Image: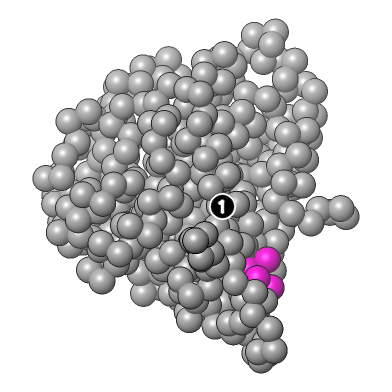
Amino acid sequence: MNGIVEINDLKELARRRVPKMFFDYADSGSWTQSTYRANEEDFAKIKLRQRVLVDMTNRTLESTMIGQKVSMPVALAPTGLTGMQHADGEILAAQAAEAFGVPFTLSTMSVCSIEDIAESTTAPFWFQLYVMRDRDFVGRLIDRAKAAKCSALVLTLDLQILGQRHKDIRNGLSTPPKFTPKHIYQMVTRPRWCLGMMGTKRRTFRNIAGHAKGVTDLSSLSTWTAEQFDPQLSWKDVAWIKERWGGKLILKGILDKEDALMAAQTGADAIIVSNHGGRQLDGAPSSISVLAEIADAVGDRIEVHFDGGIRSGQDVLKALCLGAKGTYIGRSFLYGLGALGKDGVTLALEIIRKELDTTMALCGKRDIKDVGPELLYQPRNAG
């Protein structure tokens, strides 16, 4: 791990260790990728106020997200195909998050199943739900999450129709991977990855395979998945999901103030300001550019969380200053996982924590719960 000092170092190591089709899946956006790039670039436009001669001792990053204690206000975001970045990837990430004291969110489109995570961890984890046309299957997914004692359900709202991701199309992405000459070459040039995959039985969508009606083999699984995202999903669906679930509910994919106001009326416990990592509507604003407006509009009625573009502890602090009560990292932990497995996820969290702690101190604060817009530099208008 010598020489790894920032998230980008993990990214470059993952690029060398993960087959191109799966690295590109994690590291790309839709269409021209303008929103994907803006998610990162717009953080740089936000400046912090440096404060001096303040007591920086006894600092704490401990906080809560939807009432759950966290060692810092950061959760691992739900990410599809995590188990293709590294063998048993969701299990390893969940274990690293548990040891670190932050929430782990399992995606519906994960390689490891709800039951795999429950058997491999002791702390409650969160489960992210995609609403499919097959409502019976959705209901069973919710029941499985309850049986696994998941402590929150994260309902994703912005994937009724799949955004086109050019890299995935060009790479011929599939799970498990196809055995064309191109794909075989990508895999054999990543021997560490191949050895890991040879040692696990988890190589497909295990939340779906064996649970969805009519899905008996890889071909039927692929067809079912492509047809199941529901374009008719509406606000009234949130009500029955909330009733069926009966626990903490987080709504993910809010990027507009009007949608935030409607979300606040659902009785959900939190919203996540997110554009799906720039993987859905290309040309949409960055998540960070709309956070303050949304937090100002609904922050007194529903807990506001943030997702999109976080690559450092400074980014976390900026999101908190703009009104978020919690943040999520997706690609940042995936880079760590692809680079070094469970240790890489831990290292990604340690990097974020150190940068967050140091930046908070240099801005003159000792408790993460006390940070706010007063830490942001606002230049005076010329003239």
Q: Secondary structure at mark 1?
A: loop
User: Quick check: 61 left or right of 326?
Assistant: right
Q: Where residue 41 sits: x, y (%)?
A: 58, 44
Residue 21 appears in view? yes
Towards the viewer: 218 or 154: 154
**Is residue 358 on the magenta stretch?**
yes
Residue appearing at x 67%, y 15% in the figure: 183
Amino acid type, mark 1: Lys
In the displayed structure, would residue 170 be above or below residue 319? above
Range covered by the magenta-colored residues: 355-359
The quarter of the picture where residue 14 lies is: top right
For residue 67, what is the image quadrant?
bottom left
Q: Foreground residue, 294 or 307?
A: 294
Identify which residue is drawn at 49% across, 56% down: 328
* Label 1 Cα neighbours within 10 Å, binned few <14 / some 14-19 / many ≥20: few
Q: Residue at x 26, y 71 (%)?
A: 300
Q: Position of residue 241 (x, y in %)?
A: 19, 50
- Asked if residue 285 is among those painted magenta in the image, a careful observer would answer no
Pick the quarter of the image with the N terminus. Answer: bottom right
Residue 303 in the figure: left or right of residue 24? left
Residue 216 image offset from top left, x and y in percent: 38, 21
Residue farthest to the front, as pictured: 383
Which percent across, then down, holds residue 74?
A: 52, 63
The residue pinned by badge 1 equals 45
| Location of residue 213 (image quadrant) | top left
Taking the view exactly as shown, the residue that stands out farthest to the top is 181
Majority secondary structure in the magenta region: helix
**Above or below — where is 344 with respect to 317?**
above
Q: Is residue 144 visible?
A: no
